[in-house]
Amino acid sequence: MIAHIKGQIAEKFNNSVIVDVHGVGYEITLTALDYDNVKLGDEIKFYTYHSIRENAEELYGFSSLAAKKLFELLISVQGIGPKAAIAILGLAQPEEVRNAIANADAAFVSKASGVGKKSAERVIVDLRDKVGIPSHYGATEIVSTPGKNEPDEALDALIALGFPLKEATAALEKVDKTLSVEERIKLALKN
């Protein structure tokens, strides 16, 4: 299993990039937001999901560990494959997608390419209890602002410590977001 790849962006095409790692190029499929945020020559790290099927091996990359964990939850839903999961995550920041699922916003999820109404409803039913409580209520809007892709480092750290996405989100819910990452992690671990 390839957990992450760190290297230089050598090529960009069709929502994929080739990351050069000491002379070896890895082709990685990205969400639309991550694809828009990288430039040729950037030194970058992607958390990866290595998909192996009978006729293909593919790498899917994410700028945050939380996005990767949400991707893994999405592909656990019957009828949602890696391409549909990438499309869902490409709608907005991972926290907004998680919030839409927690709020049972099937209309938002169904806006992803290749995801119909029934598949969106299945995502909601299967994952609503697994993604944690909503960070805010109401319909989620599609956010297409390149350059605003800032992963929550405290959430990533809790996930790296072994917390499931739901518990990590719940632990950080009551912690002030203006505190430093270290302080947020300490307070979340106390809760």
Image (cartoon, rainbow, N blue to C red):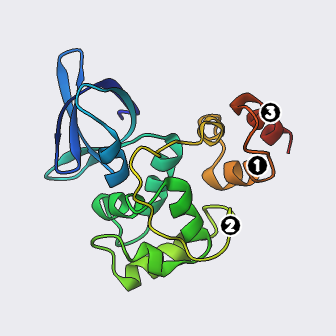
What count of labels does the image hold? Answer: 3
Instruction: Indicate the amino acid at tag 2.
Output: His
Instruction: Indicate the amino acid at tag 3.
Output: Lys
Q: Residues within 10 Å of mark 2 (few under 14, many from 20)?
A: few
Measured from the top left, where is residue 134 in percent x and y?
Answer: 67, 66
* The C terminus, quarter of image: top right
Residue placed under numbered mark 3 in the picture: 186
Which of disc 1 and disc 3 is earlier in sequence? Answer: 1
In this view of the protein, which residue sits in the foreground, 25 or 17? 17
* The N terminus, quarter of image: top left
Q: Left or right? Give the position of 118 relative to 57.
A: right
Residue placed under numbered mark 1 in the picture: 171
Residue placed under numbered mark 2 in the picture: 136
Secondary element type, mark 2: loop
In this view of the protein, which residue sits in the foreground, 140 or 124? 140
Q: Residue at x 31, y 46 (%)?
A: 36
